[in-house]
Image: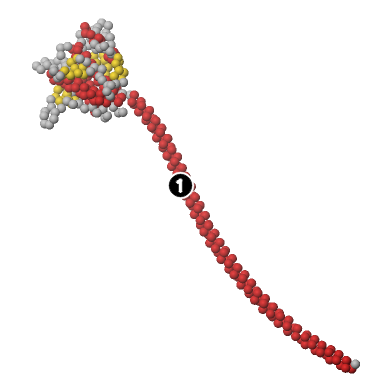
């Protein structure tokens, strides 16, 4: 028992010693563990902080990149707005120009329609015929109211009315009533007023002016082959065409009652020249339209080299009535030429 007691005491003492030693060592280990934990935590915190800082840096970089992208997008947006504004301005300008162009086109179309109507009206108006009115007064042919011819005895008044077979003719598509040129004479058959040479000269000068006007009209292509017309009113002249240094011959397209040893030779030559010019104009027109012909044809007697119209000599002689009718035929053919030229010359 004593031995057991001693062993028990020793064991308790050892246990107590161990426990005391153990109690002494526990705080030191906990401190070490705390230090280790603190160190680990410090490492972990530094790693997390580093990671967080890296994330923050990445976020900052992304924010900066997003800001730069936003600035670029804003610049692009501003540029797009500016381009859109410019495009709208161009569109508005183009629309204004389109409206102006359409307005101008409509104005031009309206102007063209108006001009075409005016032109059509002017085509219907024969200016030359208004300026040179060829008509008749009893047996005389007249131009601008001027009679051309000589005194006709009363007995010849009925002969003048039966000198043609077909007064209503259609030549070159132009209708012309020749019967109006030969009306029934006065009831008593007498002509109380005699045509003076001054009036006849004025009528022939006006006819020469008309023929020269037709020759100079653009588009007619009328050329006189042998004679030229010198316009001098009632004292007009007909001059021969010459070549080189030859001297042209001048004939007077006027006359009077004065005595002359050569009679009416110069006057007749001038009438022949005027009739030749009328023939040249007719031949030019015929080349353009084969259906065109004078109502009173102009023919040439090759034996004597003189022209005749409607089988009547144009020369002034003793037969005043026939010469008056020949002058009327000349004016009729001239009126025919005016109608044809005014209808076809500018087409």
Q: Is residue 200 visible?
A: no
Determine the residue positioned at 79% across, 87% down: 18
Between 194 and 347, the one nearer to me in the picture = 347
Between 347 and 239, the one nearer to me in the picture = 347
190 above or below 15?
above
Residue 335 horizontal side relative to residue 35, left or right: left
Residue 276 is drawn in which quadrant?
A: top left
Determine the residue positioned at 20% across, 8% down: 153
Q: Residue furthest top?
A: 188
Determine the residue positioned at 18% across, 12% down: 320
Residue 76 horizontal side relative to residue 110, left or right: right
How far across and how far down the image is residue 86, in percent?
47, 50
Between 124 and 147, the one nearer to me in the picture = 124
Q: Residue furthest left?
A: 261
Residue that badge 1 annotates: 90
How far across and how far down the image is residue 11, in percent?
83, 89
Residue 70 is drawn in which quadrant?
A: bottom right
Which quadrant does the C terminus fall into? top left
């Amino acid at each position: 028992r004593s031995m057991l007691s001693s062993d028990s005491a020793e064991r308790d003492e050892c246990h107590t010693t161990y426990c005391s030693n153990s109690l002494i060592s526990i705080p030191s280990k906990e401190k070490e563990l705390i230090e280790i934990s603190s160190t680990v935590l410090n490492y972990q915190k530094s790693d997390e902080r580093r990671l967080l800082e890296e994330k923050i840096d990445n976020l900052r970089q992304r924010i900066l990149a997003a800001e730069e992208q936003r600035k670029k997008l804003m610049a692009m947006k501003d540029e797009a707005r500016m381009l859109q504004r410019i495009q709208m301005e161009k569109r508005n300008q183009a629309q204004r120009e389109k409206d102006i162009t359409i307005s101008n086109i409509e104005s031009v179309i309206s102007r063209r329609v108006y001009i075409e109507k005016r032109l059509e009206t002017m085509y219907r108006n024969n200016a030359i015929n208004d300026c040179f009115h060829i008509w008749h007064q009893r047996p005389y042919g007249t131009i601008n109211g001027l009679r051309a011819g000589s005194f006709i005895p009363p007995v010849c008044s009925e002969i003048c009315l039966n000198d043609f077979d077909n007064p209503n003719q259609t030549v070159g598509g132009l209708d012309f009533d020749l019967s109006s040129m030969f009306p029934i004479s006065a009831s008593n058959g007498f002509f109380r007023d005699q045509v003076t040479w001054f009036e006849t000269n004025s009528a022939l000068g006006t006819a020469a002016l008309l023929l020269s006007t037709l020759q100079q009209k653009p588009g007619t292509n009328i050329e006189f082959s042998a004679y030229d017309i010198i316009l001098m009113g009632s004292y007009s002249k007909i001059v021969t065409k010459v070549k080189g240094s030859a001297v042209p011959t001048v004939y007077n397209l006027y006359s009077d009652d004065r005595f002359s040893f050569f009679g009416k030779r110069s006057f007749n030559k001038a009438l022949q020249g005027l009739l030749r010019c009328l023939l040249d104009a007719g031949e030019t027109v015929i080349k353009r339209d084969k259906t065109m012909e004078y109502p009173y044809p102009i023919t040439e007697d090759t034996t004597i080299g003189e022209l005749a119209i409607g089988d009547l000599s144009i020369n002034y002689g003793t037969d005043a009535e026939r010469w008056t009718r020949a002058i009327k035929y000349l004016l009729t053919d001239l009126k025919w030429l005016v109608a044809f030229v005014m209808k076809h010359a500018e087409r």
